[in-house]
Amino acid sequence: MPNQVADFGKVRFSNAATHDKTSVLYEPAIRPLSTGAPSDVQTNERANMKKILSMSACAMSVLLMAGCAAPLNRDTETSLNKAVGIEVAPVADGVAVKLPEKALFDFNKSEVRGDASAVVDRSAVLLKRSKKPVIVEGYTDNVGTLDYNQQLSEARATAVGYALVARGVTMERIRTKGNAYNNPVASNDTPEGRALNRRTEIVVRGETMETLMGKK
């Protein structure tokens, strides 16, 4: 299947609910974020940002920013991550910030939920400690067609990318990639496994855990 650039302002997803276990035989493209006219994703993100400028959101931001001052304490940073449901771990080409679907999106949707601000805020805090390039990768489970899941994973990665830019992460650092149901972290044969596979991972290439999370 050719890998096409999705127009996320016009994407229409099917309601297919069949299990398509076809192997993904191509390498999904890594894309820069667009700097042109605002897309629906950007417009929605700006609207969401206005909603979070409340006293409660400000108080949460103060809490999440607490780890910014040096020296960083690894235990404190880990606790802040767990509080919003994300995991930070070393990977082969850098460090990955792992965000589960339930923390960001409604089922089968690609718009970052308004109540996901704490998750994205915390992710942005971590990313702004680095100057290294970032790839935002979207993943799905294997329910539905390959084409459907590819479009959904790309749209979600793009939505998270713009949400990070809105919080001060430099756009030039960010690339996005949709992986459909490639590289599952659990079995797709159970509801629990499929939930784990529906995720977004932000990989900071060439970075270390010490830079993002402090020394052990």
Image: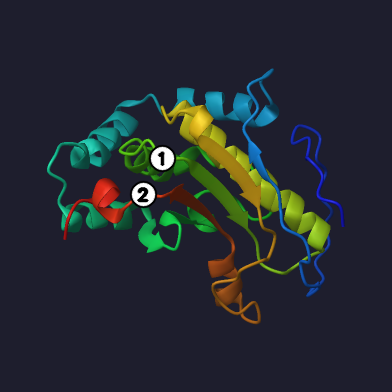
Question: Which residue is drawn at the image coordinates 69% and 28% (left, top)?
Answer: 40
In the rendered image of this protein, does residue 120 appear above or below residue 19?
above
- Amino acid under label 1? Lys
Q: Position of residue 49 (x, y in %)?
A: 47, 26
Residue 133 falls left or right of residue 57: right
Please indicate, yes or no, whether residue 109 appears anywhere in the rendered image: no
Q: Residue at x 69, y 26 (%)?
A: 39
Q: CA distance from mark 1 to mark 2?
A: 7 Å
Residue that protrudes farthest toward the right in the picture: 1
The mark found on residue 13 in the picture is: none
Q: Nearer the viewer, residue 140 or 97?
A: 97
Give the side of residue 101 with respect to residue 67, left or right.
right
| Closest to the observer, 88 or 132 | 132
Mark 1 near mark 2, Cβ–Cβ under 8 Å?
yes
Is the residue marked by circle 2 packed among few (<14), some (14-19), or many (20+) residues within 10 Å?
many
Q: Residue 207 bears which disc, if any?
A: 2
Which residue is drawn at the image coordinates 56% and 29% (left, top)? Answer: 45
At numbered mark 2, what does the secondary structure look like: helix, strand or loop?
loop
Residue 132 visible in the picture: yes
Task: Return the x and y of residue 14 as percentages of the image width and height.
Answer: 84, 53
Residue 63 drawn at (x, y percent): 22, 39
Q: As displayed, is residue 118 above or below residue 178?
A: above
Which residue carries the number 1 mark? 132
Rendered position, 195 above or below 5 = below
**Looking at the rendering, in which quadrant would you find the N terminus?**
bottom right
**Horizontal and vertical percent for residue 138?**
61, 53
Q: Secondary structure at mark 1?
A: loop
Q: Earlier in the sequence, mark 1 or mark 2?
A: 1
* Foreground pick, 23 / 189: 23
